[in-house]
């Protein structure tokens, strides 16, 4: 069965796999692909009708460098929600007409972020309130560059004293971005934020479960190969070993069924 899908574009962050894990913990199917896929790939990915949203990961790169990594422009033309995380926020800002500048001080580690306004992404999500009633979030920062000018249509969603634009949103287009990392456990409300994005904003039904994936994968293999013999090149890595296990399960099931 086809499931609502989130596309994660990987810019090389060490924790991109954690984004996928958090999405899957929300019972939503997702796929990770490299950031440099083509516009045609993105449009074809969306053409199947199951794509509900896109997440742009963090990176070790700097948006301010010449010929640096950019998301396929088609991402912003699909009409689906987009969430930029750290570098993903910076490239979103740069590609949509904002400004990103090299920060004088790199911010790495624990930070307390003030949630501003009541965007759909952060509404009702907070860790504590200041004496004057400001909602605050305990998060994990890791960045040098910072957004200094918002793209047209965006408003500030979160801020710290050293990072005035720690989050931004264009709710008309359902574009959201945060300078911190919601995928790591150090951001205490990160799981709630990602669940809010994929289920509430993107509208994913949350009907995907990892234990069901094996049965679905085996069924797809059976549909593609039928009774034909399968030759697999096994490297010993995770991908080929997983494929071998699934094919073996399919062949074993086929033999058992044919013996009855």
Image (tube, grey):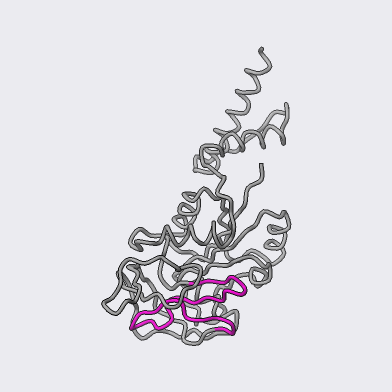
154 in relation to 194, above or below: below
The percent coordinates of residue 234 (x first, y second) are: 56, 38
Is residue 251 rendered magenta in the image?
no
> Would residue 2 appear left or right of 124 to someone viewing this image?
right
209 in relation to 125, above or below: above
The percent coordinates of residue 107 (x first, y second) are: 34, 76
Q: Quarter of the image containing the N terminus?
A: top right
Main SS class of the magenta portion in the image:
strand
Q: Quarter of the image containing the C terminus?
A: top right
Q: Residue at x 47, y 58 (%)?
A: 19
The percent coordinates of residue 73 (x first, y second) are: 65, 73
52 in relation to 27, above or below: below
Which residue appears farthest toward the left when viewing the image? 131
Q: Residue at x 38, y 60 (%)?
A: 184
Is residue 156 rendered magenta in the image?
yes
Q: Nearer the viewer, residue 243 or 119?
A: 119
Q: Residue at x 63, y 47 (%)?
A: 3
């Amino acid at each position: 069965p086809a499931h609502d899908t989130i596309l994660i574009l990987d810019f090389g962050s060490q924790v991109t796999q954690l984004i996928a894990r958090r999405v899957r913990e929300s019972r939503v199917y997702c796929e990770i692909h490299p950031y440099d896929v083509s516009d045609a790939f993105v449009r074809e990915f969306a053409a199947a009708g199951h794509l509900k949203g896109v997440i742009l990961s963090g990176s070790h790169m700097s948006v301010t460098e010449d010929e640096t990594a950019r998301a396929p422009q088609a991402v912003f033309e699909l009409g689906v929600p987009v969430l930029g995380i750290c570098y993903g926020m910076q490239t979103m800002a740069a590609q949509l007409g904002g400004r990103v500048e090299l920060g004088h001080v790199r911010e790495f580690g624990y930070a307390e972020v003030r949630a501003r306004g009541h965007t759909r992404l952060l509404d009702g999500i907070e860790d504590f309130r200041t004496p004057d009633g400001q909602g605050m979030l305990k998060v994990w920062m890791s960045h040098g560059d910072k957004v200094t000018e918002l793209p047209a249509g965006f408003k500030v969603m979160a801020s710290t004293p050293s990072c005035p634009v720690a989050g931004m949103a264009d709710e008309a287009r359902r574009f959201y971005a945060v300078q911190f990392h919601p995928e790591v456990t150090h951001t205490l409300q990160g799981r709630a934020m990602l669940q809010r994005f994929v289920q509430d904003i993107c509208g994913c039904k949350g009907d995907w479960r990892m234990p069901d994936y094996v049965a679905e994968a085996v069924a797809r293999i059976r549909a593609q190969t039928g009774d034909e013999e399968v030759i697999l090149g096994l490297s010993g890595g995770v991908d080929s070993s997983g494929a071998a296990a699934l094919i073996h399960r399919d062949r074993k099931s086929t033999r058992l069924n044919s013996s009855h």
